[in-house]
């Protein structure tokens, strides 16, 4: 069974004061299988963040359904959706979203504290994910004492510590230099190879080339998809660059 089923989703934002409506998503329809690593690309304003927010139960579609393991969570009340998100989904954002007054260790632990886990279990899990992400030496430090790359790896550790069904990443390399980006993307790839389903919004062709599938959104619809198949990352990157060029030309492949 698909882990995620997006059924003809449409999103219309109604602006306040009776202004014009904005159709951010027209008709988005796709499924994601467990263990997939999907990158979502598209020009600014194409609807990527709107889509990610709906998939991650942060917002509701105007029309259509989003099923996670066959169940529609979009119809739950806000407080029930918050609990569902906390227990089942992991998030990584461009700006890390760490708590400055919490140590790296306490930032990573946060989802487990909220879930009421025992201190021993928390310590064990923190050690495992910190080792996995190469930040075990930093646990006693505070976010302002570590680099951007280390902050983002802390955010990844926090996102995966509760073993989420899906990991959502919104421009996770957007604030990183190229070395830290590569490091982070390799970590995400490794986490995916261990079975984690990942959905990542990105503007970066290189970041997208670490995924298995790249979905291009244009004018609120899925315009094109690329699958890694047996391609090397370099070959996939070439294909992504070609697709981005077509997308920027307005979708007409015949134009020279
Ligand atoms: N809360 C909102 N109210 C009204 N319109 C919105 C709102 N959020 C987004 N939009 C509009 O919906 C469309 C899609 O926006 P969205 O943020 O999803 O695009 P995006 O592809 O993520 O863009 P970017 O790459 O710049 O982040 C845009 O036209 C945007 O102006």
Image: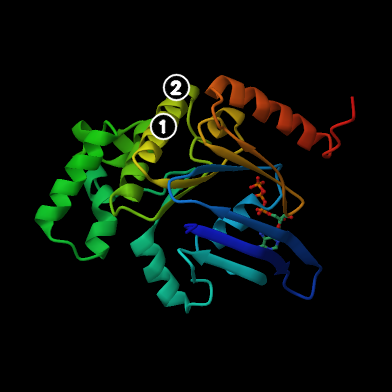
Quadrant location, ligand no. 1: bottom right
Q: Is residue 59 visible?
A: no
Dot 1 and dot 2 residues touching (CB under 8 Å): no
Q: Where is residue 232 in the image (x, y as percent from the top left)?
A: 53, 22
Q: How crowded is mark 1: few (under 14 residues within 10 Å), some or many (20 or more)?
A: many
Q: Is mark 2 within 8 Å of ligand 1?
A: no
Q: Is mark 1 within 8 Å of ligand 1?
A: no
Please, which residue is most extreme toward the left here? 120
Q: Where is residue 68 in the image (x, y as percent from the top left)?
A: 48, 63
Q: Name the residue that disc number 1 marks.
A: 184
Q: Name the residue: 24% across, 45% down.
A: 103
Which of discs 1 and 2 lies nearer the camera? The answer is 1
Measured in 3D between alpha carbons, the distance from the residue under mark 1 to the one under mark 2, in whole angstroms, is: 9 Å
Q: Where is residue 244 in the image (x, y as percent from the top left)?
A: 72, 33
Q: Position of residue 238 (x, y in %)?
A: 65, 22
Name the residue nearer the viewer: 226 or 188. 226
Q: Quadrant of residue 194?
A: top left
Please say if 166 is above or below 241: below
Please, which residue is most extreme toward the bottom here? 77
Judging from the image, what secondary structure is the residue with disc 2 in? helix
Which numbered marker is on residue 42? none
Please say if 195 is above or below 186: below
Q: Quadrant of residue 52?
A: bottom right
Judging from the image, what secondary structure is the residue with disc 1 in? helix
Q: Name the residue: 37% across, 34% down.
A: 190
Q: Name the residue: 25% across, 65% down.
A: 115
**In the rendered view of the protein, which quadrant contains the C terminus?**
top right
Q: Earlier in the sequence, mark 1 or mark 2?
A: 2
Which numbered marker is on residue 179? 2
Name the residue nearer the viewer: 255 or 120. 255
Name the residue nearer the viewer: 234 or 20. 234
Q: Is residue 196 visible?
A: yes
């Amino acid at each position: 069974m698909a882990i995620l089923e997006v059924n003809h989703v449409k999103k219309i934002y109604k602006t306040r004061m009776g202004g014009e409506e904005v159709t951010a998503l027209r008709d988005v329809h796709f499924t994601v299988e467990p263990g997939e690593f999907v990158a979502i690309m598209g020009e600014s304003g194409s609807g990527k963040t709107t889509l990610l927010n709906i998939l991650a139960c942060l917002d509701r579609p105007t029309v259509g359904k989003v099923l996670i393991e066959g169940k529609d969570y979009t119809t739950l009340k806000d407080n029930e959706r918050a609990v569902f998100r906390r227990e089942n989904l992991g998030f990584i954002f461009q700006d890390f979203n760490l708590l400055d007054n919490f140590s790296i260790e306490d930032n990573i632990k946060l989802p487990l504290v909220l879930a009421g886990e025992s201190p021993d279990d928390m310590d064990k899990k923190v050690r495992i994910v910190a080792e996995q992400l190469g930040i075990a030496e930093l646990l006693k430090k505070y976010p302002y004492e570590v680099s951007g790359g280390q902050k983002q790896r802390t955010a990844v550790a926090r996102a995966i510590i509760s073993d989420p069904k899906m990991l959502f990443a919104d421009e996770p390399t957007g604030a990183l230099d190229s070395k830290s980006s590569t490091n982070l993307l390799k970590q995400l790839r490794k986490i995916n190879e261990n079975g984690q389903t990942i959905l990542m919004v990105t503007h970066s062709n290189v970041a997208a080339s670490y995924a298995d599938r790249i979905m291009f959104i244009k004018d609120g619809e899925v315009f094109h998809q690329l699958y890694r198949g047996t391609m090397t990352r370099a070959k996939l990157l070439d294909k992504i660059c070609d697709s981005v060029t077509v997308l920027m030309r307005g979708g007409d492949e015949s134009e020279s």
